[in-house]
């Protein structure tokens, strides 16, 4: 299901709500993609943050239309593991040195510019 947002300006905004029901802190990374999962230009109020146990955080994502009348996007929250001895370091794989993402939840949105 796609949520439709009508805007009278040259950009539209989506507020997403995150929470941590798990017994450990978790690191979240918020990203905006086009409908084909390619990163797009967007202003994200809080891109990366650590959410404590039972914590909640809302994030505002603002996306420009860039001359189009409508824009289809996906906004994703990815959970990235935290090393147990440090809350600031992301786990790395030994072979590729890339981040391990355990979970990614995405919402689909359609921004429409009012005429």
Image: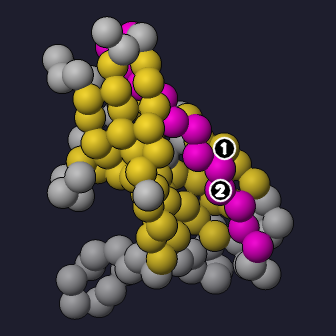
Using the image as rendered, state which of residue 19 and residue 87 is in the foreground: 19
> Which disc is residue 18 wearing?
2
View extreme (bottom): residue: 95
- Tell me whether circle 2 and circle 1 mark residues in contact (CB < 8 Å): yes
Question: Which quarter of the picture shows residue 58?
Answer: top right
- Report whether 55 appears left or right of 44: right
View extreme (right): residue: 54
Q: Residue 114: percent from the left, percent from the top?
A: 36, 14
Q: Earlier in the sequence, mark 2 or mark 1?
A: 2
Q: Residue 106: percent from the left, percent from the top?
A: 44, 61
Q: How many marks?
A: 2
Residue 69 in the image: above or below residue 88: above
Residue at 52% across / 70% down in the picture? 79
What predominant SS class does the magenta segment belong to?
A: strand
Question: Is residue 21 something that shows in the picture?
Answer: yes
Residue at 46% across / 31% down in the picture? 5
Q: Kindly identify which residue carries mark 1.
A: 58
Residue 11 drawn in magenta:
yes
- Where's the C terminus, which quadrant? top left
> Which disc is residue 34 wearing?
none
Residue 73 drawn in magenta:
no
Q: CA distance from mark 2 to mark 1?
A: 6 Å
Q: Residue 80: percent from the left, percent from the top?
A: 49, 72
- Report whether 64 appears left or right of 54: left
Disc 1 packing (10 Å; few <14; some 14–19; many ≥20) = few
Say which element carries label 1. Answer: strand
- Residue range of the region highlighted in magenta in the rendering: 9-21
């Amino acid at each position: 299901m796609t949520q439709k947002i009508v805007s009278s300006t040259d950009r539209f905004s989506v507020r997403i709500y995150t929470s941590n029901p798990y017994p450990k802190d978790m690191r979240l990374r918020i990203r905006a993609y086009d409908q084909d999962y390619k990163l797009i230009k967007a202003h994200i109020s809080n891109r990366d943050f650590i959410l404590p146990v039972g914590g909640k955080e809302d994030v505002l994502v603002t996306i420009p239309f860039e001359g189009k009348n409508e824009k289809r996007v996906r906004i994703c929250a990815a959970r990235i593991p935290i090393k147990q001895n440090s809350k600031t370091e992301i786990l790395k794989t030994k072979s590729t040195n890339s981040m391990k993402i355990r979970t990614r939840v995405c919402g689909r949105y359609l921004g429409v510019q009012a005429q």
